[in-house]
Amino acid sequence: MKSYRLLLVLLIGLFVVLSTAFGWAVASYLQAQAGNDEATQPVVAVATATPSTATAIPTQAMLPPTPYSPVTGTPLIIPTVPEPTQPNPTVEVVSESPPLSPSMDFYGVNFASGEERIAIKIVPQSKKFNRGKPIVISFLPGRRCNFGDKRACVYAYLNENLENTIFVSVHSGVGGEAQAYRNTLEGTLVNSGAYTVKRVHSNMNALEGARVTISQGGRTVENLELSFISRVPPRSLRKYLSAAVYDALDLAASIGGNGSYPMAPGQPQLVFETCGWRLPGEALSSVATATSASIYIAVIQKSASD
């Protein structure tokens, strides 16, 4: 009997101890949870609050670079809550004209590669010059022009005044597209010209102002003239050949002694060049040969009297 009473007392004591420990544990947990809620409450408030003003944040690592300006210092704007919508003003978009580009068209004659054969006929003003016979330069327009293929190398560009310029380079050797033109200016001997430098310049002056017609297929353009002609001598050949095609005409004008050439504002121009041969008594340069000793360059435009 005494043993049962002792066992009961021990069980009651154990129950009291366990109940007390459990109460302490629950109290500690609730206190810790309350502390955590108080610690996280400001963070949530900051995260959910709506900013009252726009904030600029440096974006060195946020925005991709552009070709127009560096990214450094460019702000990224975080917008505020939008105001009530207002009607947007109507913005008229003005479309700009497309940029001008060079053309291979010269008054309806197509100088593009692969087009029909082109014939340029030059008629001197004086019937005494070249016995009154016209000078014909005939070729197929192309991008490459090897001697003997009857082709001219053709380029197009806009000059500083945005006037269209077509630049034609032709051969002048025996059988070349511009042989008759070169022969008229300087004559022909074996691997050299026949005339002196002085006579060549006299012939150039006589040829300026000549009437020109250009034909292609069934199309013929009249009322043109040879408005300018110049010669690049052997001593200046390296300088000329080193220049860009759009600088060639101005350079030839300055080398030839005229300084400039007549240019009708707003009109397209056709420029052509061909080689000259060595003239009697003329020294060659390091880049000149007997049959490529100089360059003749000329301009064709609408006639001033048209």
Image (tube, rainbow, N blue to C red):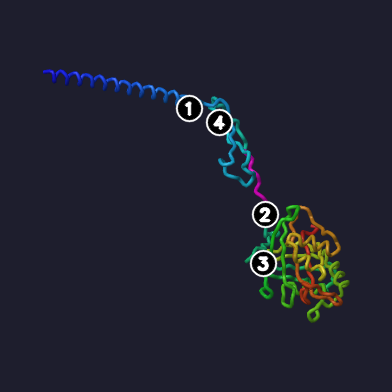
| Disc nearest the viewer among 1 and 4 | 1
Residue that badge 1 annotates: 43
User: Residue 65: x and y, percent?
Assistant: 59, 45
Front of the two marks 4 and 2: 4
Residue shown at the point (87%, 75%) measured from the top left: 196
Report how far apart the C-alphas of labels 3 and 4 lie in the structure.
61 Å
Residue reaching furthest to the bottom: 190
Name the kind of residue labelled 2 in the image: Ser
Q: Residues within 10 Å of mark 4 (few under 14, many from 20)?
A: few
Q: Which residue is mark 4?
A: 79
Q: CA distance from mark 4 to mark 2?
A: 44 Å
Q: Is residue 215 above or below residue 68?
A: below
Magenta residues, dominant SS class: loop
In the displayed structure, 159 sits above or below 33; it is below
Foreground of the two, 289 or 47: 47
Of the numbered discs 2 and 3, the one sitting upstream in the chain is: 2
Q: Nearer the viewer, residue 172 or 208?
A: 172
Q: Residue furthest left?
A: 1
The answer to whether the residues at label 4 and label 2 have Cβ atoms under 8 Å apart is no
Q: Which residue is mark 2?
A: 101
Q: Which residues are magenta?
A: 93-102
Q: Is residue 202 left or right of residue 22?
A: right
